[in-house]
């Protein structure tokens, strides 16, 4: 199989994001974003996904983090989708529980090209420094939409906002790593295409 790799640039009046994804990587993240806690979350996701990701993004964060966070999800997801091509041979499904001290998050997903998100993370609400962690939902929605995944992310328990968020991004990474592993040759669908 040729290397699964893609490069994406997206520019709007609100944000400019450039991204390179290599699926067969070692979890190496080179991330430039003007939102330090969000950058920390993307680095966690990349680390446990096993992909190599270079991403640099800027945007109108003086208005709100929302645009840059959502668009980062859209760009990273579309770059992953392009790198995956026809998705031949991939496991498709992935699931994991990620604990981080008192917090526990479950992630189950399917890289099916059928975007759907169930996000049961109600306690992930509040601020870390001046970053509103509830906006992380926008990253997840954007990523799922363009990567083409059905995703269920459930907070089982947790108190500390940093722990809850980080457990969620680790879980998303670990489940992604399993789903993108090549285990066969054909298109992994009974209908013959994804
Ligand atoms: Mn941390």
Image: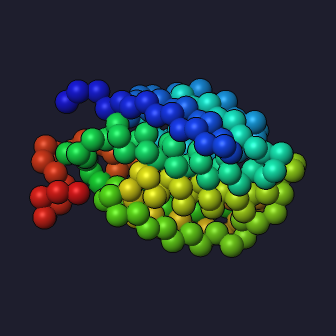
Q: Position of residue 13 (x, y in %)?
A: 66, 43
Q: Give the side of residue 91 with respect to residue 31, left or right.
A: left
Task: Choose between 152 and 136: the one closer to the eye.
Answer: 136
Q: Is residue 126 above or below residue 59?
A: below
Outermost residue, right direction?
A: 129
Rendered image quadrant of residue 94: bottom left
Image point (58%, 38%), residue name: 11
Number of labels in the image equals 0
**For the point 70% across and 59% down, which residue is it?**
135
The image position of residue 192, as x and y in percent, is 12, 58
Residue 115, visible in the rendered structure: yes
Q: Depth check: give the residue in front, 90 or 33.
A: 33
Which residue is more in the foreground, 92 or 60?
Answer: 60
Is residue 171 visible in the rendered structure shown here? no
Quarter holding the C terminus is bottom left
Q: How is the image coloured?
A: rainbow
**Could you tell me residue 105's position as x and y percent?**
58, 62
* Residue at image point 59% right, 72% down: 120
Residue placed most toward the observer, 26 or 31: 31
Give coordinates of residue 45: x percent, y percent. 55, 44
96 displayed left or right of 29: left
The N terminus: image quadrant: top left
x 39%, y 31%: residue: 6
Q: Is residue 72 above or below residue 110?
A: above
């Amino acid at each position: 199989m040729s290397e699964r790799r893609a490069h994406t640039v997206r520019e709007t009046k609100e944000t400019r994001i450039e991204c390179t994804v290599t699926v067969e990587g070692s979890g190496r993240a080179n991330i430039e974003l003007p939102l330090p806690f969000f950058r920390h979350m993307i680095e966690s996701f990349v680390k446990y996904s096993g992909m190599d990701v270079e991403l640099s993004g800027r945007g109108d964060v003086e208005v709100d983090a929302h645009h840059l966070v959502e668009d980062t999800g859209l760009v990273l997801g579309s770059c992953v989708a392009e790198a995956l091509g026809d998705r031949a041979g991939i496991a498709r499904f992935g699931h994991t529980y990620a604990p981080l001290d008192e917090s526990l998050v479950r992630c189950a997903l399917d890289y099916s090209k059928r975007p759907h998100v169930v996000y049961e993370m109600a306690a992930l609400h509040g601020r870390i420094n001046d970053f509103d962690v509830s906006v992380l939902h926008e990253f997840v929605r954007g990523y799922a939409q363009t990567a083409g995944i059905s995703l269920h992310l459930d907070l089982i328990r947790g108190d500390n906002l940093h722990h809850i968020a980080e457990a969620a991004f680790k879980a998303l990474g670990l489940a992604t790593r399993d789903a993108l592993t090549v285990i066969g040759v054909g298109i992994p669908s009974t209908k013959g295409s994804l």
